[in-house]
Amino acid sequence: MPVVGEAQAEEGKVSSFSLRMDDHEYDALRAMSLLTGTPMSELVRVAIGETVTRFGETARRDGALDEQLRQRQQAVALLEQRAASLAERSTDVQSGTGSITTES
């Protein structure tokens, strides 16, 4: 199983890592490297960076969606309370135990 190693860190330091991949993955990475003229380690570094960025964007979007869901749940609960209160008033008026007041 091929191992790809050495990646350039942003501060100019070189960090080592091992990446195990099957022969098909290695061949695809090597072919991409040859076609683009980009070292395999750089291709892997860019792919990791894109994945991390996408993950962060997804997490922020999920957080915003969670907040929207919470707000909608609160709105639904409020509407349910108001509907129950109106239904109760309507029942009271129909049974003659309630009164309706109007403002002029």
Image: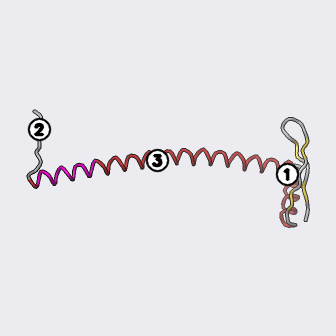
- Dot 3 amino acid type: Arg
Point out the tag, 1 or 2, that comes first from the N-terminus: 1
Quadrant including the C terminus: top left
**SS type, badge 1:** helix
Point out the tag, 1 or 3, that comes first from the N-terminus: 1
Is 43 a magenta residue? no
Q: As drawn, is 10 to the left or to the right of 80?
A: right
Q: Mark 1 or mark 3, which is nearer to you? A: 3
Which residue, given by chain and number where applicable, does mark 2 sit on?
Answer: 102
Mark 1 to mark 3 CA distance (whole Å): 47 Å
Give the percent coordinates (x, y) of residue 89: 18, 49
Q: Mark 1 or mark 2, which is nearer to you? A: 2
- Camera-side residue of 84 and 69: 84
- Dot 1 amino acid type: Thr
Q: Main secondary structure of the magenta part?
A: helix
Give the percent coordinates (x, y) of residue 76: 37, 50
Mark 3 to mark 2 CA distance (whole Å): 36 Å
Give the percent coordinates (x, y) of residue 52: 72, 47
Q: Which of the 4 image quarters holds residue 9? A: top right
Which of the labelled discs sits on residue 70, or is there none?
3
Which residue, given by chain and number where applicable, does mark 1 sit on?
Answer: 36
- Camera-side residue of 91 and 26: 91
Mark 1 to mark 2 CA distance (whole Å): 79 Å
Extreme residue toward the front, this view: 97
Give the percent coordinates (x, y) of residue 92: 14, 52
- Dot 2 amino acid type: Thr
Give the total number of marks visible in the rendering: 3
Q: Eyeballing the image, is 2 above or below 68?
A: below
- Camera-side residue of 62 and 47: 62
